[in-house]
Amino acid sequence: MKPVHVIGVPLDLGGNRRGVDMGPSAFRIAGLAEQLVRQGHTVVDKGDLPTPIPETTLEDHDAHKKYIRAIAKVCAKLYQTALASLAEGAIPLVLGGDHSLGAGSVGAAWKWAKQTSARPIGLLWIDAHGDMNTPATTSSGNVHGMPLAALLGQEPAELARIGGAAPKVLPEHTVLLGVRNLDEREKIAVRDSGVHVFTMKDIDRQGIALIAEKAVELAGRGTAGIHVSFDMDVCDPSIAPGVGTPVKGGLDYREAHTLMEIVADGRMLTSVDMVEVNPTLDVRNATAQLGTELVLSALGMKIL
């Protein structure tokens, strides 16, 4: 088994609801590292990356991309940290924090793939939302709604150019799964982007097993591996209440596990994000506990 490097990113600048900065601690309290060790992994906890909070972030605020410079600095540090872990042969397990951190973690996977195989990286973006707004289309200015657009080479440029080049991922290797809440302008962006999209309607009609197998096949075809970026709000609020932007009608418990088990079966996983856990909205740490279980499934836990 590959070693796992835990990287906490208490980033709380990308959204408008506070509390996700405590997400990494919630995962640790849930016993994530200890359970991975029991599963047979060597685990190194790299601690939390230094991350500012809004009260100490003194910059000119662009209303269309709030706190963008501070977010970009955190993502650049994550890029370096995750890339170092990949170079050591480990799986970076990034604990958020809000989803804007994906600009750094996916960027690291892209760079590693380029350096080691000259092949692209596959991306499985599991989220209730599209995260494909740009400063020109956003209605809120919240950057956690923009990282996938940046990874595909669009704006905000501060995130898109982390690592020195854009795009980080190509549409044909990118799968957006579990979406059920898109802004009207974002719907157009998602349709025009060319990425593969499986909505909750698709999952309802075809079943999670078939969709997950398709997703892994699409993200893995011709790539060096698959980065999984998992926003806990893809799960239904009945099992994941502690998220900043809950939307009814998400993945149920077994659907979420089946998805991650099929990711593990594909044996192409390079790196993982688990993001948007907000303990201030949670019930007895249930969301971080679920996220911990899902990580275990993605990293090979078997029922039998």
Image: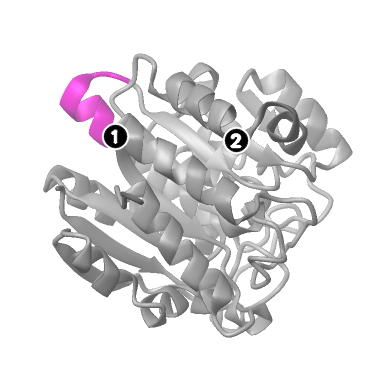
Residue drawn at 31 percent across, 52 percent down: 301
Main secondary structure type of the part rendered in magenta: helix
Q: Identify residue for label 1.
A: 111
Crowd rating for badge 2 (residues with CA inside 10 Å; few <14, some 14–19, many 20+): many
Q: Nearer the viewer, mark 1 or mark 2?
A: 2
- The question of residue 112 being in magenta is answered with yes
Q: Give the answer, above or below, for where 240 lies relative to 133.
A: below
Q: Which residues are magenta?
A: 111-119
Crowd rating for badge 1 (residues with CA inside 10 Å; few <14, some 14–19, many 20+): many
Q: Position of residue 108 (x, y in %)?
A: 32, 42
Q: Position of residue 139 (x, y in %)?
A: 84, 51
Q: Secondary structure at mark 2?
A: helix
Q: Give the answer, above or below, for where 107 lies relative to 272.
A: above
- Report which quarter residue 143 is drawn in: bottom right
Q: Secondary structure at mark 1?
A: helix
Direction from residue 245 to residue 33 in the image, left or right: left
Residue drawn at 58 percent across, 58 percent down: 232
Direction from residue 205 to residue 268 in the image, left or right: left
Q: Is residue 125 visible?
A: yes
CA separation in Å, label 1 and label 2:
31 Å
**Amino acid on which the number 1 mark rests in the picture:** Lys
Q: Position of residue 97 (x, y in %)?
A: 51, 66
Residue drawn at 58 percent across, 39 percent down: 148
Q: Identify residue for label 2.
A: 208
